[in-house]
Amino acid sequence: MTRQQVEDLFTRRDRAINRRDAAGWTVIYAQDAVVESPTAGGAVMGRKAIEDVTRTWFEGFPDVTFTSTMLVIDGDHVVSIGEVRGTDTGGFMGLPPTNKPFRLPMVFVCTLDDGLVVHVDADWCAESQADVTDVSAIDRTRAAR
């Protein structure tokens, strides 16, 4: 892929999450893609499962938005840095809603193949948790693992 094609792919991803379009978010993933994320409870395999996790985010945080601040591209490897914001009004991962807002600096380390994302290692920046308004649901889920 050219640099412009990679940038376009990630722009489509960002627009989809901000429309709360789970199918649009996951269309950039290969059918057998793997996403590793503490907010997904570990490794999630397959586009359908990734879409299900994405829908869980939208249900838990109906106002969720993602702002991309940096995209680092090196061939088939991409690091997307940004921030996720929302309010826990729907509950998350089996926990009741806190009705509190949150802000999480996020990092997605992605591998591409044949124009699609095949692997993602996603995490929030632990050092910046002092800046996070409330991630208690995610932190409780992480601690329970």
Image (tube, rainbow, N blue to C red):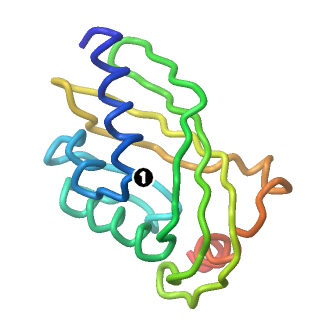
As drawn, 82 above or below 129? above
- For label 1, the residue is 36
Q: Farthest residue to the bottom: give it.
A: 96
Kind of residue sitting beneath label 1: Glu
In the image, residue 127 above or below residue 10:
below
Q: Which of the image's four quarters has the N terminus?
A: top left
Give whichever of 32, 66 is nearer the camera: 66
Instruction: Assign the C terminus to one quadrant of the image.
Output: bottom right
Q: Quadrant of residue 77?
A: top left
Q: At numbered mark 1, what does the secondary structure look like: helix, strand or loop? A: strand
Residue at 50% x, 28% y is 79
Q: How many marks?
A: 1
Is residue 55 found left or right of 85 in the rendered image? left
* Image position, residue 121 (x, y; %): 46, 44
Residue found at the very far top of the displayed protein: 2
Q: Residues within 10 Å of mark 1 (few under 14, many from 20)?
A: some
Left or right: where 63 falls relative to 59: right
Percent across and percent down for residue 25 are 30, 48
- What residue is at 66 percent from the left and 84 percent from the top? 98
Residue 44, picture quadrant? bottom left
